[in-house]
Structures are given as C-alpha cells and as structure tokens.
Image (cartoon, rainbow, N blue to C red):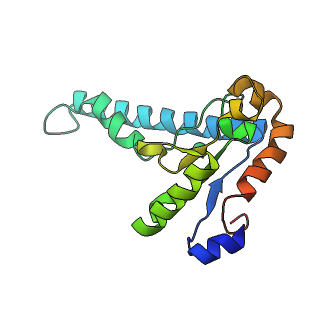
Amino acid sequence: MTSASKQQGIPLKIGSGYRTYEHQKKLHEDFNAKAKAVADSAHAEVKAWEDGGEKGPKPNEAKIIKEKMKNIIYAMPPGTSKHEGGFAMDVNWRSLNKKDQVALKKIMDEQGWKQGTGSEIHHFELDPTKFGYNNKLEAIKENKASFEKFNKEWGKVPHNNNE
Ligand SMILES: [Zn+2]
C-alpha cells in the first residue's frame, strides 16, 4: 500500500522484517560478540585502575557495561524471534516526526500490530494466535508459510517498498 503511505506522507522504512533462522542466528551471534567486547573492555578498565595505571575513583564494572550496552541492539536466539515467524518488523520510528508517528501508530493499531516499548520502540509485532497458531514457537517453525502471511499483513500497512 505504497499509495496509502504517499497519501499520508509517512516516510516509513523497514529496517528488518522477516528473517530466516540463519539470519537470526547471525544477528544473535553478532549481539553476543558485541556484548562480550563490552564486558571485556569494562573489565580491562577496572583492571587498569587496580594495576595503578588509572587515576580517580575505582570504575564500576557493572555500570560501565550497562551504559555501553545501551547502544547495542539485542537479538533473540535463533528459533525464538517473532521476526523468524514473519510476525515482526522494525521500522524507522525514531526518525519520524511526531505527526507521522501518531499517524503510523493509528494504522498499525488498526492492523493489529503491537508496538514495542523503550529500546524496542521501533519494533512492531502481530499476535500469531490470531493467525491460527497456538503460540509463537509454532509460528516460527512454520516460518515459510507465515512469511506469505507476513507479506500479506505487511502489504496492508502503507510503506515504501522494501526500503
Ligand atoms: Zn524487532
């Protein structure tokens, strides 16, 4: 429904929609690698202080990790993300102005997409039980079938083609 998007003028972009198991696995591994790098560097900071190389108060390792992790997007383990079931998508929420956010939220509400909160504010998802699945994991297992469903549902949401 690109035309509807243009009518409403929402400059919407999908960052991530349907993902294969392999893609989710890669994202999860990337997340783990980044999280490990953060933990290692925080540990190194504390160690440098303990070794007397740094001045000032002792750095708080947990606090450093928490601060640095704010910039890292979490990715669920493969086999557990609604993105794999074709029931989730990430959009450029933060780059939309307030008016477009309100308009998009209204459309998404009407289509049954539930918005994430906090650091997941860009994430929208559908409830697989409304599509004949007993639960999320069942929907993920049949991800090929639900990819078609996703395209169909996603097609109802005004957006710029696969940007
Ligand atoms: Zn997401």
> Which quadrant is the N terminus positioned in?
bottom right
Q: What is the x, y in percent for residue 10?
A: 56, 70
Q: Would residue 56 be found to the left or right of residue 129 on screen? A: left
User: 3 or 160: which is nearer to us?
Assistant: 3
Q: Which residue is located at x 70 percent, y 70 percent?
A: 2
Task: Indicate the quadrant where residue 64 lies.
Answer: top left
Residue 43 at least partly seen: yes
140 shown above or below 55: above
Q: What is the x, y in percent for residue 51?
A: 25, 29
Q: What is the x, y in percent for residue 135?
A: 70, 24
5 shown above or below 148: below
Q: Which residue is located at x 66 percent, y 36 percent?
A: 82
**Extreme-left residue of the structure:** 56
- Label count reads 0
**Extreme-front residue of the structure:** 110
Task: Indicate the quadrant where residue 77 lies.
Answer: top right
Instruction: For ligand 1, give the image quadrant.
Output: top right
Q: Which residue is located at x 57 percent, y 71 percent?
A: 11
> Which quadrant is the C terminus positioned in?
bottom right
**Extreme-right residue of the structure:** 145
User: 113 or 92: which is nearer to us?
Assistant: 113
Q: Which residue is located at x 79 percent, y 52 percent?
A: 152
Q: What is the x, y in percent for residue 36?
A: 50, 32
Q: Would residue 8 be found to the left or right of residue 81 on screen? A: left
User: 138 or 30: which is nearer to us?
Assistant: 138
23 shown above or below 136: below
63 shown above or below 23: above
Residue 97 at least partly seen: no
